Image: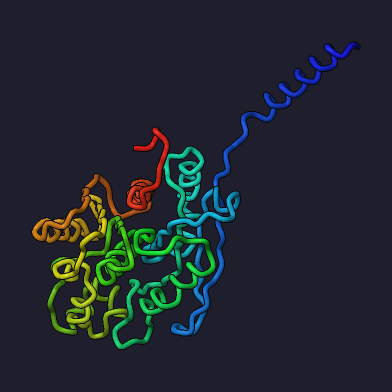
């Protein structure tokens, strides 16, 4: 076999191997699930973090970060167990979503605030320990501009509460089906025990329920007076929400409109379930990506 034939055979074999293997798949990122120590809570707190493709391939690069908060009954593995991580990886791989870190900490039923009486100081943990821990141990960009927060249901409440209470810390906030209640019933203690909403909330807001403490932490009340200048805001809710949270979302829209605070608000068909949340998470993350000023491919919206 002469040299020309040998070269031709080698090229043919290489092409055959590529055809069998298929096109190389773009790096898609990975997840880490670990625990953060806490002196404030007295125990470590599990968390999961989604790392974009370039996190491992470019060791000098730093990234924006989104703290994405789970709902009541959820946990740190919400994005992984639900399959949402697969959609996020696909969006990273195709370039439709900018690259940033996505962190979900366990929060139990805390509503992401300090409980009435200070028994569980989750908000203090989140702000004083957890965020510094993440930003010390992972390659994040510093400053409000590169830090976003979002969540679903209870996590949507927590995201709005934290962003409105500490707007100097966050550049953007997203919330889907946030647990917003515009007209919380005012009844006596005996009546409160018979209403499901109070049985759900009394661990955090006191038993008997402390309405003043609710008002102090309620995103709807905070939205009326908080300095929201420069904070990019997006929220949505299903029109058939099982808990009636669409009324709270509509009220928040009215408050922000009255104050002429720029924001994006949507009511979509759907209820209060994972099917609804799964459809909204890509939209929420795209909003965060745009808030960070990250470039995407032409396929992105």
Which residue ends up furthest to the front in the rendered image?
A: 60
Point 46% across, 47% down: residue: 88
Q: Quadrant of the C terminus?
A: top left
Nearer-the-camera pick, 207 or 46? 46
The vertical placement of 283 against 186, above or below, is above
Residue 208's spot in the image, x, y percent? 23, 85
Nearer-the-camera pick, 126 or 116? 126
Q: Is residue 177 left or right of residue 227?
A: right
Q: Is residue 160 left or right of residue 32?
A: left
Q: Quadrant of the N terminus?
A: top right
Residue 114's spot in the image, x, y percent? 33, 80
Is residue 48 at least partly visible in the picture? yes
Q: Is residue 106 left or right of residue 12?
A: left
Colour theme: rainbow
The vertical placement of 186 against 228, above or below, is below
Is residue 150 at least partly visible in the picture? no
The vertical placement of 283 against 214, above or below, is above
Residue 45's spot in the image, x, y percent? 49, 74
Which residue ends up furthest to the right in the rendered image?
A: 1
Snapshot quadrant of residue 116: bottom left
Residue 136's spot in the image, x, y percent? 51, 70
Point 50% across, 46% down: residue: 89
Point 18% across, 84% down: residue: 189
The vertical placement of 37 against 140, above or below, is below
Point 45% across, 69% down: residue: 106
């Amino acid at each position: 076999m002469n040299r020309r034939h040998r070269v031709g055979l080698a090229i043919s074999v290489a092409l055959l191997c590529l055809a069998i293997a298929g096109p190389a798949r773009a790096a898609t990122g990975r997840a880490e699930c670990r625990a953060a120590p806490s002196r404030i809570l007295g125990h470590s707190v599990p968390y999961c973090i989604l790392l974009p493709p370039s996190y491992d391939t470019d060791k000098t690069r730093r990234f924006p970060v989104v703290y994405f908060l789970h709902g009541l009954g959820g946990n740190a593995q919400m994005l992984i167990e639900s399959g949402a991580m697969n959609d996020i990886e696909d969006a990273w791989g195709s370039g439709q979503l900018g690259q940033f870190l996505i962190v979900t900490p366990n929060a139990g039923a805390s509503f992401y605030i300090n409980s009435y009486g200070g028994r569980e100081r989750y908000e203090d943990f989140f702000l004083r320990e957890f965020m510094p821990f993440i930003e010390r141990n992972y390659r994040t960009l510093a400053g409000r501009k590169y830090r976003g927060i979002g969540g679903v249901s209870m996590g949507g409440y927590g995201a709005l509460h934290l962003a409105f209470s500490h707007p100097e810390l966050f550049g953007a906030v997203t919330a889907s089906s946030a647990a917003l209640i515009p007209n919380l019933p005012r009844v006596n203690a005996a009546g409160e025990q018979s209403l499901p909403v109070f049985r759900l909330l009394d661990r955090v807001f006191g038993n008997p329920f402390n309405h003043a403490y609710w008002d102090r932490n309620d995103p709807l009340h905070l939205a009326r007076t908080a300095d929201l200048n420069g904070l990019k805001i997006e929220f949505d809710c299903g029109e058939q929400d099982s808990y009636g949270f669409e009324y709270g979302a509509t009220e928040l829209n009215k408050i922000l409109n009255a104050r002429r605070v720029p924001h994006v608000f949507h009511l979509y068909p759907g209820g209060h379930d994972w099917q609804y949340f799964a459809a909204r998470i890509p939209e929420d993350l795209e909003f965060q990506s745009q808030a960070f000023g990250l470039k995407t491919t032409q396929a992105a919206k």
